[in-house]
Image (spheres, rainbow, N blue to C red):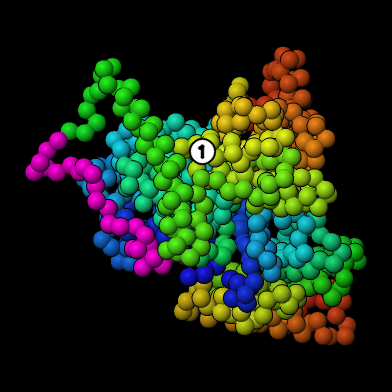
């Protein structure tokens, strides 16, 4: 919705079925300057957002990623602490980030729903959508209190990920744990 | 109005603009979001006057739709998969009774084994029911075809099914130009039934017809279907004038003018196929695509003309008849019977298996080399099939439960179907 508001084409779709709560699910998003015709799943993503860091060693999350890919993981820990130091070595350090999105959600929403915070982190990490457009999308989609709270979580995550990007020691292995 | 919106919600809002007076539906994945959204519009009063009737099954949903339509109300419903099968007797009745009901079919596979994902098995099971069947390639087409469907249904006294790929379209959030209420009102006049049941002036409809006239009744239904072939392009043109954008009609062509090989398909897979065709074009191959929007009645003459001069036809379809072959392909074979072009059937995307540009492009390359068989299955795991065949030949005890895969579940997830009956 944010990309659409910025005049681009976007497509988002989930891949789910009859999962129980807690089962791994995946969803996809394409953003383009041209109309998007295909409806196939994305198997070589330019960016990956991991909502649940407990999956990193259970599911082949990183298949298809190029060394240029952006990766954002919802965790209070670092890539090294997650046992991903070797994985991280194959990627551009300025494109790997962690973000304590669940903690931010608990702080701002009172519920462990990290989605909006992760989108804030995604905006900061990739620059593909502006925080302003993201904020409008969030408040349009969730009018009233929930929208305001999600927007606050998204802004906090944006700041954490953006600040980390300009820190001289930022190596993609330091978590922005300020909100913890 | 341009909106970034889920396909189901876009369809629900559009259906509401068509002012149905009775909506009766039973939830089943992946149709659920559509009727939830229609129900919410009825409850909020945005869609009024309209009665949303909750029932206990799809059979009841179609039966209530028949009753509503027969008494002169504009009636809408939606279903998928087993839901369509469960209402099938009434589906045929709606056509036989010449009732202009519009139904969304959120295409889904049919069990067993149970599978909630997308293919076209459900639509194909109704391809002889007497309903017009329109297939949407995109959510924009899904939206626009619903408006056209009500108009067509009521003009010809024939029910219309708008088929949109379950999950692939119903759950995709994409850009859609939503019809405005004033535009829909200008395009779709108030429903004036040619006949309606009235307790003050009682008549019987659907009464017994014996051997002396049944064939004539069926032939008349066939003629009404043929009338739809005339009327759909006109209604699509009129739609373009009213709404300021083209509307899908009988079929669409893409890069077919000089094509040696033409792919024919239904629904959302066409977008991916077009990307694959562009890829093969860049490699110097002359390939094109025909998307069939109107599957019933089948526009055989238009398909024949569109395929004239083509050296090879490849039908990609998300359904097949076990022991037979393709369903769409069988119609294509009849349409091109006077040409020398061989028709290949490629079954793809069953039970939600992704149809990827890479696999389609690879299949087209093998077609170009003359290596494509008469009937093939895209991305079929031949090793698994061979192992299972060998096991059965060896005595076949143990190992696999009937109807289950010969190895761990292949789909994105497994588990009891909690979302749908």
Residue B257 in the magenta stretch? The answer is: no
Classify residue B100 as left or right of residue B387: left
Query: Taking B328 as reference, is B8 above or below it?
Result: below
Query: Taking B68 as reference, is A136 above or below it?
Result: below
Segment colored magenta: B178-203
Q: Tag count in the figure?
A: 1
Q: Residue at x 57, y 28 (%)?
A: B334
Q: Residue at x 55, y 46 (%)?
A: B251
Classify residue B18 as left or right of residue B114: left
Quarter occupied by residue A114? bottom right
Percent x, y of residue B344: 69, 31
The N terminus of chain A - image quarter: bottom right
Of all chains, the one bearing label 1 is B
Classify residue B248 as left or right of residue B17: right
Query: Taking B300 as reference, is B277 above or below it?
Result: below
Front-lying residue, B206 or A60: B206
Q: Is residue B96 visible?
A: yes
Percent x, y of residue B316: 65, 38
Front-lying residue, B302 or B110: B302
Query: Taking A28 as reference, is A174 above or below it?
Result: below
Front-lying residue, B156 or A40: B156
Q: For mark 1, does the 10 Å Cα neighbourhood hold few (<14), some (14 to 19), or many (20 or more) residues? A: many
The C terminus of chain A - image quarter: bottom right
The residue furthest left is: B200
Q: Residue at x 59, y 39 (%)?
A: B305
Secondary element type, mark 1? loop
Q: Is residue B54 visible?
A: no
Percent x, y of residue B329: 60, 32
Percent x, y of residue A93: 87, 73
Residue B201 in the magenta stretch? The answer is: yes
- Which residue in the protein does label 1 denote? B299
């Amino acid at each position: 919705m944010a990309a659409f508001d910025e005049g681009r084409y976007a497509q988002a779709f989930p891949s789910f079925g009859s999962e129980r709560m807690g089962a791994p699910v995946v969803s996809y998003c394409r953003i383009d300057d041209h109309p998007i015709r295909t409806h196939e799943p994305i198997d070589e993503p330019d960016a990956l957002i991991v909502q649940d860091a407990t999956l990193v060693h259970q599911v082949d999350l990183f298949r298809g990623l190029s060394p240029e890919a952006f990766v954002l993981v919802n965790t209070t820990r670092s890539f090294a602490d997650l046992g991903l130091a070797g994985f991280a070595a194959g990627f551009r350090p300025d494109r790997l980030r962690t973000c304590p999105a669940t903690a931010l959600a608990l702080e701002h929403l009172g519920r462990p729903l990290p989605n909006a915070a992760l989108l804030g982190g995604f905006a900061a990490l990739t620059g593909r959508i502006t925080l302003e457009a993201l904020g409008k999308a969030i408040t349009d989609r969730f009018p009233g209190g929930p929208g305001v709270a999600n927007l606050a979580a998204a802004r906090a995550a944006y700041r954490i990920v953006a600040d980390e990007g300009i820190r001289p020691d930022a190596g993609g292995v330091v978590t922005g744990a300020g909100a913890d | 109005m341009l909106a970034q919106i889920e396909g189901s919600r876009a369809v629900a809002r559009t259906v509401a603009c068509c002012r149905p007076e009775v909506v009766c539906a039973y939830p089943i994945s992946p149709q659920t979001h559509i009727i939830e959204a229609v129900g919410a519009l009825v409850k909020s009063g945005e869609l009024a006057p309209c009665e949303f009737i909750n029932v206990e099954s799809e059979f009841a949903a179609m039966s209530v739709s028949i009753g509503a339509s027969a008494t002169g109300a504009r009636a809408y419903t939606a279903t998928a998969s087993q839901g369509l099968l469960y209402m099938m007797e009434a589906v045929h009745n709606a056509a036989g009774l010449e009732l202009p009901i519009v139904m969304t079919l959120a295409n889904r596979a049919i069990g067993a084994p149970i599978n909630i994902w997308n293919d076209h098995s459900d639509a194909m099971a109704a391809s002889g029911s007497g309903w017009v069947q329109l297939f949407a390639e995109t959510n924009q087409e899904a939206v626009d075809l619903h408006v056209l469907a009500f108009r067509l249904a009521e003009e010809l006294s024939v029910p219309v099914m708008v088929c949109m790929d379950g999950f692939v379209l119903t759950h995709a959030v994409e850009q859609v130009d939503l019809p405005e209420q004033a535009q829909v009102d200008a395009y779709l006049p108030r429903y004036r039934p040619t006949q309606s049941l009235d307790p003050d002036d009682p008549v019987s409809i659907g009464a017994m017809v014996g051997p002396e006239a049944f064939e004539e009744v069926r032939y008349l239904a066939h003629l009404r279907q043929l009338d739809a072939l005339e009327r759909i392009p006109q209604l699509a043109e009129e739609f373009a004038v009213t709404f300021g954008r083209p509307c899908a009609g009988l079929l669409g062509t893409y890069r077919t003018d000089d094509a040696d090989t033409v792919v024919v398909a239904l629904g959302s897979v066409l977008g991916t196929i077009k990307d694959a065709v562009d890829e093969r074009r860049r490699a110097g191959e002359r390939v094109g695509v025909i998307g069939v929007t109107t599957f019933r009645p089948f526009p055989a003459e238009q398909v024949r003309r569109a395929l004239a001069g083509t050296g090879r036809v490849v039908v990609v379809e998300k359904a097949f008849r076990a022991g037979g072959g393709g369903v769409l392909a069988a119609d294509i074979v009849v349409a091109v019977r006077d040409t020398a072009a061989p028709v290949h059937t490629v079954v793809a995307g069953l039970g939600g298996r992704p149809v990827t540009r890479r696999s389609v492009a690879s299949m087209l390359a093998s077609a170009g080399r003359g290596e494509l068989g008469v009937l093939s299955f895209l991305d079929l795991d031949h090793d698994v099939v061979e192992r299972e065949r060998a096991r059965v030949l060896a005595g076949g005890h143990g190992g696999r439960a009937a109807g289950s895969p010969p190895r761990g579940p292949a789909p994105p997830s497994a588990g009891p179907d909690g979302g749908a009956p």
